[in-house]
Image: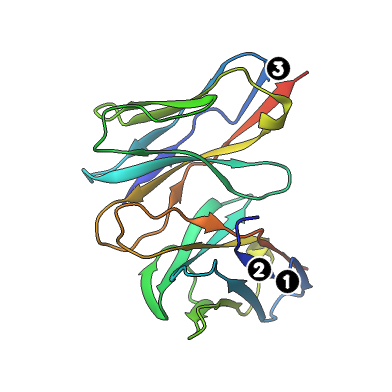
Amino acid sequence: AQTVTQSQPEMSVQEAETVTLSCTYDTSENNYYLFWYKQPPSRQMILVIRQEAYKQQNATENRFSVNFQKAAKSFSLKISDSQLGDTAMYFCAFKRAGGGADGLTFGKGTHLIIQP
Amino acid sequence: DSGVTQTPKHLITATGQRVTLRCSPRSGDLSVYWYQQSLDQGLQFLIQYYNGEERAKGNILERFSAQQFPDLHSELNLSSLELGDSALYFCASSVEVGAAWDEQFFGPGTRLTVL
Protein backbone atom coordinates (compact mmCIF):
# COMPACT_ATOMS: atom_id res chain seq x y z
CA ALA A 1 0.00 0.00 0.00
CA GLN A 2 1.11 3.54 -0.58
CA THR A 3 0.79 6.61 1.59
CA VAL A 4 0.88 10.30 0.76
CA THR A 5 1.83 12.91 3.32
CA GLN A 6 1.28 16.65 3.14
CA SER A 7 2.88 18.24 6.17
CA GLN A 8 1.51 21.75 5.75
CA PRO A 9 -2.16 21.94 6.77
CA GLU A 10 -2.37 25.63 5.84
CA MET A 11 -0.26 28.25 4.10
CA SER A 12 -0.83 31.91 3.45
CA VAL A 13 1.06 34.18 1.03
CA GLN A 14 0.60 37.56 -0.57
CA GLU A 15 -0.68 37.90 -4.10
CA ALA A 16 2.11 37.69 -6.74
CA GLU A 17 4.43 35.78 -4.42
CA THR A 18 5.77 32.32 -5.11
CA VAL A 19 4.69 29.48 -2.85
CA THR A 20 5.78 25.86 -2.58
CA LEU A 21 3.57 23.08 -1.25
CA SER A 22 5.25 19.93 0.03
CA CYS A 23 4.32 16.31 -0.53
CA THR A 24 6.10 13.09 0.30
CA TYR A 25 4.95 9.60 -0.46
CA ASP A 26 5.85 6.05 0.32
CA THR A 27 5.56 3.19 -2.14
CA SER A 28 7.32 0.04 -3.24
CA GLU A 29 6.21 0.59 -6.83
CA ASN A 30 8.68 1.69 -9.46
CA ASN A 31 6.19 2.97 -12.00
CA TYR A 32 3.52 5.39 -10.91
CA TYR A 33 1.94 8.77 -11.45
CA LEU A 34 1.82 11.72 -9.12
CA PHE A 35 -0.73 14.50 -9.26
CA TRP A 36 -1.68 17.79 -7.70
CA TYR A 37 -5.39 18.50 -7.51
CA LYS A 38 -6.97 21.82 -6.60
CA GLN A 39 -10.27 22.01 -4.73
CA PRO A 40 -11.67 25.58 -4.59
CA PRO A 41 -14.58 26.53 -2.34
CA SER A 42 -16.94 25.14 -4.99
CA ARG A 43 -15.59 21.68 -3.99
CA GLN A 44 -14.90 20.74 -7.62
CA MET A 45 -11.74 18.64 -7.97
CA ILE A 46 -9.48 20.10 -10.66
CA LEU A 47 -6.30 18.49 -11.95
CA VAL A 48 -3.45 21.00 -11.77
CA ILE A 49 -0.45 19.00 -12.90
CA ARG A 50 0.79 15.43 -13.22
CA GLN A 51 4.17 13.70 -13.26
CA GLU A 52 5.10 10.29 -14.56
CA ALA A 53 7.66 8.62 -12.31
CA TYR A 54 9.74 7.38 -15.25
CA LYS A 55 10.27 10.93 -16.50
CA GLN A 56 13.16 12.78 -14.94
CA GLN A 57 12.08 16.14 -16.28
CA ASN A 58 9.85 18.06 -13.91
CA ALA A 59 6.36 18.84 -15.22
CA THR A 60 5.31 22.44 -15.83
CA GLU A 61 1.91 23.93 -16.57
CA ASN A 62 2.01 27.70 -16.94
CA ARG A 63 2.52 29.13 -13.40
CA PHE A 64 2.57 25.67 -11.84
CA SER A 65 5.64 23.45 -11.71
CA VAL A 66 6.77 20.49 -9.67
CA ASN A 67 10.02 19.40 -8.09
CA PHE A 68 10.02 15.62 -8.35
CA GLN A 69 12.73 13.81 -6.39
CA LYS A 70 12.14 10.11 -6.95
CA ALA A 71 14.88 8.82 -4.66
CA ALA A 72 13.64 11.04 -1.84
CA LYS A 73 9.99 10.28 -2.70
CA SER A 74 9.22 13.95 -2.72
CA PHE A 75 6.84 15.82 -5.02
CA SER A 76 6.44 19.52 -4.28
CA LEU A 77 4.28 22.03 -6.15
CA LYS A 78 5.50 25.53 -6.89
CA ILE A 79 3.01 28.23 -7.77
CA SER A 80 4.59 31.33 -9.27
CA ASP A 81 2.99 34.78 -9.40
CA SER A 82 0.18 33.58 -7.14
CA GLN A 83 -3.31 34.92 -7.80
CA LEU A 84 -6.40 35.31 -5.63
CA GLY A 85 -8.04 32.54 -7.63
CA ASP A 86 -5.36 30.13 -6.46
CA THR A 87 -6.94 30.12 -3.01
CA ALA A 88 -8.06 26.52 -2.51
CA MET A 89 -7.27 23.17 -0.94
CA TYR A 90 -4.46 21.41 -2.76
CA PHE A 91 -4.19 17.65 -2.69
CA CYS A 92 -1.21 15.56 -3.66
CA ALA A 93 -2.20 12.17 -5.10
CA PHE A 94 -0.55 8.90 -6.17
CA LYS A 95 -1.63 6.27 -8.65
CA ARG A 96 0.07 3.05 -9.63
CA ALA A 97 0.91 2.73 -13.31
CA GLY A 98 0.65 -0.36 -15.46
CA GLY A 99 -2.24 -2.65 -16.26
CA GLY A 100 -3.68 -2.96 -12.79
CA ALA A 101 -6.78 -1.14 -11.73
CA ASP A 102 -6.50 1.28 -8.88
CA GLY A 103 -7.84 4.51 -7.50
CA LEU A 104 -5.99 7.61 -6.41
CA THR A 105 -4.38 7.80 -2.98
CA PHE A 106 -4.62 11.33 -1.63
CA GLY A 107 -2.78 13.28 1.03
CA LYS A 108 -4.70 15.22 3.68
CA GLY A 109 -4.38 18.44 1.75
CA THR A 110 -2.93 21.92 2.19
CA HIS A 111 -5.23 24.91 2.49
CA LEU A 112 -3.59 27.70 0.50
CA ILE A 113 -4.76 31.24 1.09
CA ILE A 114 -3.66 34.02 -1.24
CA GLN A 115 -3.92 37.40 0.48
CA PRO A 116 -4.61 40.56 -1.56
CA ASP B 1 -17.64 21.41 -16.24
CA SER B 2 -15.92 18.02 -16.28
CA GLY B 3 -18.73 16.24 -18.13
CA VAL B 4 -19.36 13.93 -15.17
CA THR B 5 -22.78 14.37 -13.57
CA GLN B 6 -23.87 13.33 -10.11
CA THR B 7 -27.31 13.34 -8.55
CA PRO B 8 -28.55 14.43 -6.15
CA LYS B 9 -26.38 17.39 -5.17
CA HIS B 10 -27.48 17.22 -1.56
CA LEU B 11 -29.05 14.45 0.46
CA ILE B 12 -30.23 14.60 4.06
CA THR B 13 -31.34 11.44 5.77
CA ALA B 14 -31.50 9.73 9.14
CA THR B 15 -29.36 7.08 10.77
CA GLY B 16 -30.24 3.56 9.76
CA GLN B 17 -31.57 4.58 6.37
CA ARG B 18 -30.42 3.58 2.90
CA VAL B 19 -29.60 5.95 0.05
CA THR B 20 -28.48 5.67 -3.58
CA LEU B 21 -26.11 8.08 -5.26
CA ARG B 22 -26.00 8.23 -9.03
CA CYS B 23 -23.18 9.06 -11.42
CA SER B 24 -23.09 9.47 -15.19
CA PRO B 25 -19.56 9.38 -16.63
CA ARG B 26 -18.25 11.48 -19.48
CA SER B 27 -19.28 10.29 -22.90
CA GLY B 28 -16.91 7.51 -23.96
CA ASP B 29 -15.44 6.86 -20.51
CA LEU B 30 -15.65 3.22 -19.44
CA SER B 31 -14.20 3.50 -15.93
CA VAL B 32 -16.03 4.93 -12.95
CA TYR B 33 -14.44 5.58 -9.57
CA TRP B 34 -16.13 6.48 -6.28
CA TYR B 35 -14.41 8.54 -3.59
CA GLN B 36 -15.47 9.71 -0.14
CA GLN B 37 -14.31 13.02 1.33
CA SER B 38 -14.90 13.46 5.05
CA LEU B 39 -13.35 15.57 7.76
CA ASP B 40 -12.08 12.50 9.61
CA GLN B 41 -10.80 10.35 6.74
CA GLY B 42 -9.95 12.93 4.11
CA LEU B 43 -10.31 11.87 0.49
CA GLN B 44 -10.32 8.13 0.05
CA PHE B 45 -10.92 5.77 -2.82
CA LEU B 46 -13.88 3.46 -2.40
CA ILE B 47 -14.34 1.36 -5.53
CA GLN B 48 -13.81 1.26 -9.29
CA TYR B 49 -15.88 -0.21 -12.08
CA TYR B 50 -14.84 -0.77 -15.66
CA ASN B 51 -17.40 -1.48 -18.36
CA GLY B 52 -19.84 -2.98 -15.89
CA GLU B 53 -17.40 -5.02 -13.84
CA GLU B 54 -15.79 -4.29 -10.49
CA ARG B 55 -12.04 -3.73 -10.99
CA ALA B 56 -10.64 -2.42 -7.73
CA LYS B 57 -11.71 -1.97 -4.14
CA GLY B 58 -10.42 0.60 -1.74
CA ASN B 59 -11.64 1.47 1.73
CA ILE B 60 -15.25 0.64 1.08
CA LEU B 61 -17.37 -0.50 4.01
CA GLU B 62 -19.43 -3.68 3.77
CA ARG B 63 -22.55 -1.55 4.23
CA PHE B 64 -21.71 0.17 0.94
CA SER B 65 -22.05 -1.34 -2.51
CA ALA B 66 -21.91 -0.11 -6.07
CA GLN B 67 -22.70 -1.20 -9.57
CA GLN B 68 -22.23 0.00 -13.12
CA PHE B 69 -25.05 -0.48 -15.58
CA PRO B 70 -24.94 -1.32 -19.33
CA ASP B 71 -25.33 2.38 -20.18
CA LEU B 72 -22.21 2.92 -18.01
CA HIS B 73 -23.87 5.01 -15.33
CA SER B 74 -23.03 3.93 -11.81
CA GLU B 75 -24.83 3.89 -8.49
CA LEU B 76 -23.36 3.84 -5.01
CA ASN B 77 -25.65 2.34 -2.40
CA LEU B 78 -25.13 3.23 1.25
CA SER B 79 -27.13 1.32 3.85
CA SER B 80 -27.56 1.29 7.63
CA LEU B 81 -26.28 4.82 7.60
CA GLU B 82 -24.34 6.18 10.55
CA LEU B 83 -23.49 9.73 11.52
CA GLY B 84 -19.92 9.12 10.39
CA ASP B 85 -21.06 8.45 6.84
CA SER B 86 -21.79 12.14 6.41
CA ALA B 87 -19.41 13.22 3.67
CA LEU B 88 -18.99 14.48 0.13
CA TYR B 89 -19.09 11.57 -2.30
CA PHE B 90 -17.33 12.06 -5.61
CA CYS B 91 -17.61 10.08 -8.77
CA ALA B 92 -14.82 10.25 -11.34
CA SER B 93 -14.53 8.72 -14.78
CA SER B 94 -11.72 7.90 -17.17
CA VAL B 95 -11.40 6.45 -20.64
CA GLU B 96 -10.10 3.03 -19.71
CA VAL B 97 -8.28 1.08 -17.13
CA GLY B 98 -4.64 0.21 -17.63
CA ALA B 99 -3.93 2.93 -20.17
CA ALA B 100 -0.53 4.54 -20.06
CA TRP B 101 -2.21 7.71 -18.93
CA ASP B 102 -5.86 8.03 -18.04
CA GLU B 103 -6.93 11.22 -16.34
CA GLN B 104 -9.78 10.94 -13.91
CA PHE B 105 -12.42 13.62 -14.35
CA PHE B 106 -14.36 14.36 -11.20
CA GLY B 107 -18.04 15.14 -10.88
CA PRO B 108 -19.35 17.92 -8.61
CA GLY B 109 -20.06 15.48 -5.77
CA THR B 110 -23.07 14.57 -3.65
CA ARG B 111 -23.17 16.03 -0.15
CA LEU B 112 -24.65 13.44 2.22
CA THR B 113 -25.77 14.50 5.68
CA VAL B 114 -26.86 11.83 8.13
CA LEU B 115 -28.83 13.15 11.12
Q: Looking at the rendered structure, which numbered label has been put on residue B8?
A: 1
Q: Nearer the viewer, residue B93 or A70?
A: B93
Per the image, the residue denoted by label 3 is A15
Q: How far apart are labels 3 and 2 at the CA level?
A: 34 Å
Q: Please state the chain letter of the residue tagged with numbered disc 1 in the rendered image.
A: B
| Rendered residue at 48%/76% (across/down) | B62
User: Pointer 2: residues within 10 angstroms few (<14), some, or many (20+)?
Assistant: many
Q: How far apart are labels 1 and 2 at the CA level?
A: 6 Å
Residue B60, x across and y down, in percent: 47, 68
Q: How far apart are labels 1 and 3 at the CA level?
A: 36 Å
| Rendered residue at 39%/45% (across/down) | A94
> Quick check: marks 1 and 2 in contact, CB under 8 Å?
no
Q: Nearer the viewer, residue A33 or B36?
A: A33
Residue A72 position by quadrant: top left
Per the image, the residue denoted by label 2 is B6
Identify the colour scheme used: rainbow
User: In the image as oriented, which residue stretches furthest toward the bottom?
Assistant: B70
Residue A77 visible in the current orientation: no
Q: Please state the chain letter of the residue tagged with numbered disc 3 in the rendered image.
A: A
The secondary element bearing badge 1 is classed as loop
User: Pointer 3: residues within 10 angstroms few (<14), some, or many (20+)?
Assistant: some
User: Pointer 1: residues within 10 angstroms few (<14), some, or many (20+)?
Assistant: some
